[in-house]
Amino acid sequence: AGYEPGTNIVHMTAAHPDHPVSIRSTHFVVPDAEGLIRHFRFTNTGDRGIALTFIHYASFWIGETPHHQAALFDESSDALVHYRGPHVFAVSANLSCAAFQAGASREQAESGRLDGQEASLGAGGALAWDFPMIAPGETAELTLYLSAADRIEPALDQLGHLRAVPYAELY
């Protein structure tokens, strides 16, 4: 784990002895774009197939306050949008999410109980992706994109531009 020399690219790994999965993630900001990339590789280290649900939870305190925040799910972009005034952050992935909740609490995200609420006042929100079967030794991948803008539409447009480029070309 650590930064690639001379770059803004950081790699992290995670594993737990009681669970047959290892996770390698790569994080970086795309040059000349207002976008953060978070790429995840889930490898089944066990001897049986596994089902996996990956949940991304975020609670943006825009303006360093939990007040006057809002979150919404934009179905056409398959994105969760966090905003307060002219500050907008949008999160999406290369795969369609299986579940979402604008206004989700950390506890709801940790439990995996996302109710599909499309809009909410508050800072939190969550997206989930299902991987129904990862065979032993096999790997599943997911790329998350986070964009920032001064309005919702430009943030979603930036996500669209990021999603249009394969991860290998962004990296």
Image (tube, rainbow, N blue to C red):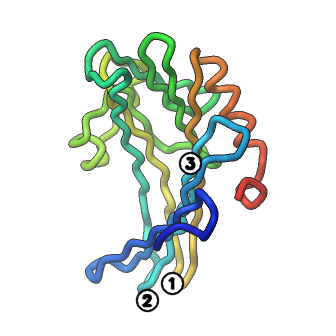
Q: In the rendered view of the protein, which quadrant contains the C terminus?
A: bottom right
Q: Earlier in the sequence, mark 2 or mark 3?
A: 2
x and y percent of residue 17 in the render?
28, 83
Marker disc for residue 136: 1
Q: Between residues 111 and 165, which one lies in front from this camera angle?
A: 165
Residue at the image position 26 percent from the left and 16 percent from the top: 67
Residue at the image position 48 percent from the left and 55 percent from the top: 130
Marker disc for residue 144: 3
Q: Is residue 5 left or right of residue 43?
A: right
Q: Between residues 91 and 151, which one lies in front from this camera angle?
A: 151
Helix, strand or loop for disc 2: loop
Q: Is residue 30 left or right of residue 102?
A: right
Gap in angstroms between the C-alphas marked 2 and 1: 5 Å
Number of the front mark, 2 or 3: 3
Q: Is residue 111 depicted above or below 126 in this figure?
A: below
Q: Amino acid at mark 1?
A: Pro
Which residue, given by chain and number where applicable, does mark 2 sit on? Answer: 47
Q: How many marks?
A: 3
Q: Amino acid at mark 2?
A: Asp
Residue at the image position 53 percent from the left and 63 percent from the top: 10
